[in-house]
Amino acid sequence: MSENILNTEEAKKSLNFVEIAVENDLKEGKNNNRIQTRFPPEPNGYLHIGHAKAICIDFGIAQKYNGVCNLRFDDTNPVKEDVEYVDSIQEDIQWLGYNWANIYYASDYFDKLWDFAVQLIKEGKAYIDEQSAEEIAKQKGTPTQPGTNSPYRERPIEENLDLFTKMNEGDLEEGSMVLRAKIDMASSNMHFRDPIIYRIIKHPHHRTGNKWKAYPMYDFAHGQCDYFEGVTHSLCTLEFVVHRPLYDWFIDQLATDEYRPHQYEFNRLNLTYTVMSKRKLLQLVKENLVAGWDDPRMPTICGFRRRGYTPESIHNFIDRIGYTKYDGINDIGLLEYAVREDLNKRVTRVSAVLDPVKLIITNYPEGKTETMKAQNNPEDENSGEHDIVFSHELYIERDDFMEDAPKKYFRLTPGNEVRLKNAYIVKCTGCKKDEAGNVVEVYAEYDAQTKSGMPDSGRKVKGTIHWVSTEGCFDAEVRLYDRLFIVENPSEDERDFKELLNSDSLRVLTGCKMESYLKEAQAGDKFQFQRTGYFCVDKDSGSDKMVFNRTVSLKDSWAKAKDK
């Protein structure tokens, strides 16, 4: 028995139902105490956050119980598949922290699957049907009415074998005939009503070229590939519950010993303000409604990575929502909370002014600069410090000055004092405006006895604002990303999903002022912009331009808006 099995009753309560099933199988000595899973993506698109949940349980179960998890590409539909997707899937799995034992493809088993189909034909359990797809669908009946037999159901075995061979020779047109399993047209399970197991696709395969013209259907290939590989626990999402009897039926026809893979189903990961449909995500990309599969607004794993999410935050989120046997929709705010919590512990605090206005310290000598110390991360006592420059002229956020301020405004307003973070207390003395009435300069005086780190003078101010010195700062582009849709559940909305897109899901700010510490930052580096949010360096950055993506704001502004 695996030494990883938890023995205490308290630990048992924390196990999910899949882990409980695995531990029971190990106790009973099933499959010679062997645990083997697989992650079987179809290489027809980029993985999204829902796939991350499947990855975590497939690889996590194998990891926890000293088992094996293989990566198997379900490449049974060459029309939609591409090597680009194969490469991206591998990158995403490794980014999440997992490595597969082996890489397989459903196409590795095409010969075995073909032989199994021939076996079914010879046993009188499969036949060639020449009806159209519409005729077959109509003839299957309804959930409350039995289907009617195909006129080709009793075709002679030799004729079926001959036609099946012809399906793969390339002379027959797509849709002209299919191979169906002969099971039960009156079954209460619609999947048992003589399901299609092979169809003609005349399109080159990215691995097998033009060898095959007849390709197995997913329901036929999936379970058999599990069996050929030695999978013990085949983990799927809940929509496959109704497919499980068919999965088992095919295995029963194929198996020659006691070994059987067993299918378990868990709930999908659904998020508010998000769509997970590959078809819809592909549409967003193809119609240029987003800037590619890794657009930081996309729910793809590469999109989250580019936006600045960490593997740890995604793991923590998935651990929180857990694995159950009922579907629901998870608040995206919980995912955002997970990344805030993770980044708060690890990233350096920096000053970045996104909407700058100049602040002139009138009693600070022109031309003088002094070096201040800024703690990298107050949550980590070992994070160290970095230098920041203070000078006569600074940049502050435009929102941090108001000429006629309300009573509870604790930032810069004439006569009011604030602390400049890591520097001095200053008192606002006025401002300068252009001809249009826009504030172009704010004036203040500093108190040299209030430098951060000096003995407490007893003076208290209610506001602290961030700033950047004009000496050594540089301009950058900042992309403020937000939720892609304006409704909580766009998949359930009857309107065209494109009508539900959030027009403010991306705002691009130019001329933002960054402290000099950020000049050496590389693509993927993450920071907290003080008082603003968490940001990372985008891959579009170069020596002549820095681009930062907002990962998430410091607080959940959507929750506040909903409460109003």
Image (tube, helix red, strand yellow):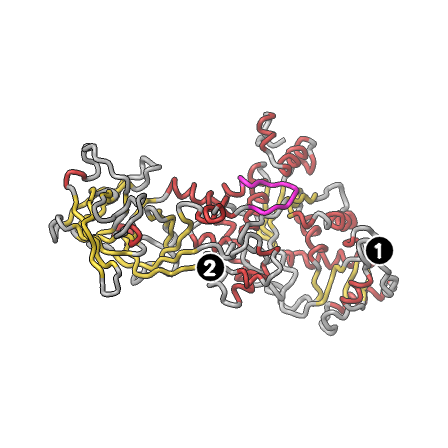
Q: Is residue 48 above or below residue 344?
A: below
**Quadrant for the N terminus in the image:** top right
Left or right position of 234 against 282: right
Given residues 475 and 209, the one toward you in this image is: 475
Query: What residue do we see at 80% from left, 66% from top?
Result: 135
Seen at 72% across and 55% down, the residue is: 220
The dot on residue 145 is 1
Quadrant of res 321:
top right
Label total for image: 2
Q: Residue 295 shows which numbered tag?
A: 2
Q: Residues within 10 Å of mark 2 (few under 14, many from 20)?
A: some
Percent position of residue 550, x then y:
40, 53
Earlier in the chain: of badge 1 and badge 2, it is 1
Q: Position of residue 121 (x, y in %)?
A: 82, 59
Instruction: Give the label on residue 49, or none.
Output: none
| Position of residue 59 measured from the top left corner of the image (x, y, whole percent) | 56, 44
Task: Note whether 317 is above or below 352 in the view shown.
Answer: above
Q: Which secondary structure lies at badge 2?
A: loop
Q: Which residues are magenta?
A: 319-330
User: Chief secondary structure of the magenta span?
Assistant: loop
Secondary structure of the residue carrying tag 1 is: loop
Spatial CA span between label 1 and label 2: 47 Å
Pair 1/2: label in front? 1
Of residues 138 and 155, which is closer to you in this image?
Answer: 138
- Report if residue 325 lies within the magenta region: yes
The answer to whether one can see residue 554 in this image is yes
The residue under label 2 is which amino acid type? Asp
Label 1, residues with CA under 10 Å away: few <14, some 14-19, many ≥20? few
